[in-house]
Image: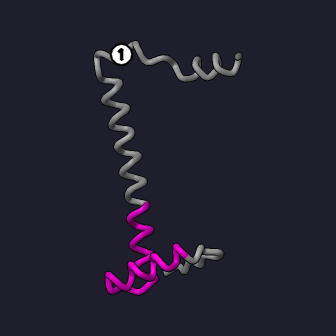
Amino acid sequence: MPTLQVRHLPEHIYQKIVERAKAKRRSIAQETVMLLQKALQMEERTKELRCQLIYRLLQDPFTQGDIPDPVLLVREDRKR
């Protein structure tokens, strides 16, 4: 199993991990792995939700044709 070393970890973050590990009766390493897994799952879930929202917006008959092309908006803004 790979090992991860984190340098210059702020003290307050380390203390929070220690407190959480103690409360959940885990080692600091176990709690850190759990926190990393949760963060990665949340990131994936957030990306999925954004894709679903964009898809729903594009399927909405009231927004079809009303969404301006972002490329054109950026180009207009740069010309100012």
Residue 2 lies, with reference to residue 61, above or below; the image says below
Q: Residue at x 34, y 26 (%)?
A: 57
Q: Residue at x 45, y 83 (%)?
A: 28
Q: Position of residue 49 (x, y in %)?
A: 34, 43
Q: Is residue 58 left or right of residue 75?
A: left
Give the colour scheme shown: one colour
Q: Residue at x 44, y 68 (%)?
A: 36
- Count how many numbered circles sit on residues in the image: 1
Label 1 SS: loop
Q: Quadrant of residue 59?
A: top left
Q: Position of residue 9 (x, y in %)?
A: 60, 74
Q: Quadrant of residue 21?
A: bottom left
Q: Quadrant of residue 77?
A: top right
Circle 1 packing at 10 Å, graded few (<14), some (14-19), many (20+), is few
Q: Position of residue 34 (x, y in %)?
A: 39, 73
Q: Is residue 18 magenta?
A: yes
Residue that lies at the very extreme toward the front in this rendered image: 12
**The C terminus - image quarter:** top right
Residue that lies at the very extreme toward the right in this rendered image: 79
Q: Amino acid at mark 1?
A: Gln
Q: Is residue 71 left or right of residue 68?
A: right
Q: Residue at x 45, y 82 (%)?
A: 18
Q: State the residue in front, 19 or 78.
A: 19
- Magenta residues, dominant SS class: helix
Q: Which residue is mark 1?
A: 64
Q: Which residues are magenta?
A: 12-39
Q: Is residue 70 magenta?
A: no
